[in-house]
Image (spheres, rainbow, N blue to C red):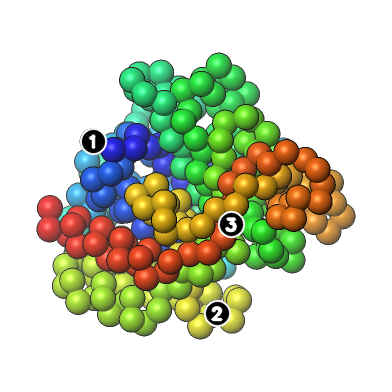
């Protein structure tokens, strides 16, 4: 299995990436680190614990990282993910108590994310794949604090940016816009980077058919998943006018499980840091017109049915443990 650390800001789609990474035998989920993004650091960290609790994921350390970007003020996506960062289910109480509701028994690791990342990369016998699906602050901080640990990173497979337009400004995608300087460090660090941006992730939509397949599993976890996706669908409808919501983040782990699901092209990718209207944009040189050498692989065409088969199977497998 591929040894993986998830660095995330759950977040509805981050939550499904945790499920996929924990469930699939070809992924060895070593650790989860959290970052402020979809909600505050406190909430995204609690949400990572809630997801693990609900899915019976135990023994994976969860540590909190950056509460805001390298420069400037934090930005959250409450309009998409709600006040908790994971709205939809009733997390506070209710009949599902003990299955994701109430205070999770899954603990928060006493170390901070930087220390957990360092310890895990140092201790693991083989280089580890980092999978960031939130703002890139933790990963940039790691590369700045421990540059020699870059050798212990096999590759960075991230959700962020776009080869087309943005979703938070006309040009910029949320994760990159939250911390453009961090993203610039990650894309320039020399470790192989694979980027799944909006041009790819908008191809995986949680359609009513997907929701029916999940509901048909008939487990408490599958019900929770349907509640999450139903909420996510409502905000995507309201904010963007999408009839079905795109489940961005799990394209990263899906790619690790089955590289044939998404086609990749090598391209030079630069992060816009100074544009008046374009700060946080990923400039993807698909036609090679800049003459810059490629520094990333960029996800393009997605086999959406194959992707959803993996998600449904993950929920099925976890629901029966
Ligand atoms: C990204 O932003 C977040 O809201 C999602 O979790 C995803 O990582 C999509 O732009
Ligand atoms: Ca995310």
Are discs 1 and 3 less than 8 Å apart at CB? no
Disc with the residue nearer the chain's start (1 vs 3): 1
- Few, some or many C-alpha atoms within 10 Å of disc 1 (few <14, some 14-19, many ≥20)? few
Circle 1 sits on which residue? 59
User: 121 or 60, which is in the foreground?
Assistant: 121
Which mark is nearer the camera, 2 or 3? 3
How far apart in space, not on screen, are marks 2 and 1 (Cα)?
37 Å
Report the disc number at residue 197.
3
Q: Secondary structure at mark 2?
A: loop
- On the image, the x and y values in percent for residue 320 come to 12, 58
Residue closer to the observer: 89 or 290: 290
Residue that appears at 59% across and 19% down: 147
Give the label on residue 281, or none: none
At mark 3, the secondary structure is loop
Q: Where residue 57 appears, x then y in whole percent?
A: 23, 46
Residue 125: % across, % down: 33, 20
> Visible in this render: residue 266?
yes
Tell me: 263 left or right of 69: left
User: CA–CA distance between discs 2 and 3?
Assistant: 17 Å
Mark 1 or 3: in front is 3
Along the horizontal axis of the image, is 316 left or right of 229?
left
Q: Position of residue 229 (x, y in %)?
A: 38, 71
Residue at 12% over, 53% down: 321
Q: Are marks 2 and 3 in contact (CB under 8 Å)?
A: no
Residue 78 seen in this snapshot: no
């Amino acid at each position: 299995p591929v040894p993986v650390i998830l660095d995330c800001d759950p977040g509805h789609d981050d939550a499904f990436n945790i499920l996929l990474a924990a469930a699939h035998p070809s992924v060895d989920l070593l650790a989860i680190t959290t970052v402020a993004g979809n909600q505050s650091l406190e909430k995204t960290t609690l949400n990572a614990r809630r997801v693990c609790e609900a899915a019976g994921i135990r023994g994976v350390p969860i540590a909190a990282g950056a509460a805001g970007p390298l420069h400037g003020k934090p930005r959250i996506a409450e309009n998409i993910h709600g006040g908790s960062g994971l709205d939809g289910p009733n997390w506070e109480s209710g009949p599902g108590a003990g299955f994701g509701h109430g205070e999770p028994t899954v603990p928060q690791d006493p170390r901070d994310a930087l220390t957990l990342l360092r310890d895990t990369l140092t201790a693991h016998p083989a280089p580890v794949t980092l999978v960031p699906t939130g703002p890139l602050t933790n990963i940039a901080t790691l590369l700045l604090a421990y540059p020699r640990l870059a050798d212990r990173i096999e590759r960075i497979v991230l959700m962020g940016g776009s080869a087309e337009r943005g979703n938070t400004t006309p040009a910029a995608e949320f994760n990159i816009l939250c911390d453009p300087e961090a993203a610039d460090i990650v894309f320039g660090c020399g470790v192989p980077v694979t980027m799944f941006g909006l041009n790819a992730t908008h191809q995986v939509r949680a359609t009513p058919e997907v929701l029916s397949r999940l509901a048909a599993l008939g487990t408490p976890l599958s019900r929770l998943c349907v509640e999450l996706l139903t909420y996510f669908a409502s905000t995507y409808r309201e904010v963007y006018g999408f009839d079905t919501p795109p489940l961005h983040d799990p394209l990263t782990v899906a790619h690790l499980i089955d590289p044939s699901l998404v086609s990749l092209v090598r391209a030079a990718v630069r992060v816009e840091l100074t544009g008046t209207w374009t700060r946080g944009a990923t400039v993807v040189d698909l036609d090679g017109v800049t003459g810059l050498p490629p520094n990333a692989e960029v996800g393009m065409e997605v086999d959406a049915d194959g992707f959803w088969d993996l998600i449904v199977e993950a929920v099925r497998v976890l629901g029966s443990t």
